[in-house]
Amino acid sequence: MTSAQARDGAVALVTGASRGIGLAVARSLAESGHRLVLTARAPDALAAAVAALRADGAQAVGCAGGVADSGRAQEGVALALREFGRLDVLVNNAATNAPYGPLMDADLTRWREAFTVNVEAALRLTQLAWRAWMSRHGGTVVNICTEGASHVGPNVGAYGTSKAALLHLTAQLAGELAPLVRVNSVSPGLVRTEMARFVWDGAEERLAASLPLGRIGEPQDVARAVAWLVSDAAEWVTGADLLVDGGTRVRAAAGTTAPHAVHERLRAAATDEA
Ligand SMILES: NC(=O)c1ccc[n+]([C@@H]2O[C@H](COP(=O)([O-])OP(=O)(O)OC[C@H]3O[C@@H](n4cnc5c(N)ncnc54)[C@H](OP(=O)(O)O)[C@@H]3O)[C@@H](O)[C@H]2O)c1
């Protein structure tokens, strides 16, 4: 058993898992031995994702429905217990980045929806998982936040504010649920998915050049971080936010060391002058 291997028979529920980061997380957890419950709204895309995972040997079932629908959330957790008899891992991944635009123009009904989907649904599912299984047997929760939650940006005020709330929720729950349940988050930078297509499509070369690690993210970059956080290799980690952003957060200092030649020339010139 590798350090990232699931405990025997472990079961994971991953929301928003029909494509993008959620599907990569599901795949990665399947590879480490988890049995899976996947959710997403569009039933056909969800069924296709479940079928693809099964074709690769995973034990997976789907539960179609919006993450903010309390009935469907209950059914997702009940399905894990009914189908597999346990629920060890919860990955709150589904999110909305709407409403997009300046906050002074934000429709407050849509603003509330951002919080319902991005924050409240994560809390509800954690409560359900806790009551159904984790309060007696333990478990781990990972919330997918965003690198952007820690700073402001144009047009993403509702998204950023709700994800900042999700970060705080992560820390609060980590304290409340320890030592039985570990609760952590992963904060991705720009990742090649549908949700972020409007950012990277047509601009990838420029964006990659602006990142210290030289490329935008792939869903697997985030999935590997989630797989580590839920594994026993991270058994002493709770309340953490794992930044998976290709260096986005540190890019202001990028290039100050790498172009050694420039600095060496400047240093040599200074020595010559002295
Ligand atoms: N991509 C990035 O650059 C990036 C950066 C930072 C953070 N993130 C975060 O990463 C997570 C995954 O995003 P992604 O980029 O992988 O998005 P994506 O490619 O658009 O995939 C989103 C997935 O979630 C499902 N979904 C969307 N709304 C849902 C809802 N209300 N209830 C249930 N399922 C829902 C979608 O299927 P249906 O539409 O059929 O429901 C789909 O399976 C999100 O939390 C996002 O905020 C992404």
Image: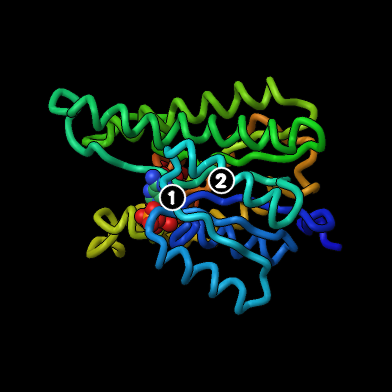
- Figure colour scheme: rainbow
Q: Which residue is mark 2?
A: 75
The answer as to whether callout 2 falls within 8 Å of ligand 1 is: no
Residue drawn at the location 42% of the way across and 38% of the way down: 68
Residue 13's spot in the image, x, y percent? 61, 50
The residues tagged by marks 1 and 2 sit, at their Cα atoms, a distance apart of 9 Å
Residue drawn at the location 81% of the way across and 56% of the way down: 3
Q: Is residue 145 left or right of residue 241?
A: left
| Amino acid type, label 1 | Gly
Q: Earlier in the sequence, mark 1 or mark 2?
A: 1
Residue drawn at the location 42% of the way across and 33% of the way down: 163
Badge 1 crowding class, 10 Å Cα cut-off, few under 14, some 14 to 19, many 20 or more, is: many
The answer as to whether callout 1 falls within 8 Å of ligand 1 is: yes
Residue 16's spot in the image, x, y percent? 46, 52
User: Is label 1 in contact with label 2 (beta carbons under 8 Å)?
Assistant: yes
Q: Is residue 188 left or right of residue 25?
A: left
Quadrant of the snapshot with the N terminus: bottom right
Tell which residue pokes out farthest to the bottom in this image.
55
Quadrant of the snapshot with the C terminus: top left
Residue 65 numbered tag: 1
Element assignment for label 1: loop
Residue 10's spot in the image, x, y percent? 76, 54
Residue 194's spot in the image, x, y percent? 33, 59
The answer to which of 24 and 187 lies nearer the viewer is 24
Q: Is residue 269 visible?
A: no
| Amino acid type, label 2 | Glu
Q: Is residue 82 left or right of residue 145?
A: right
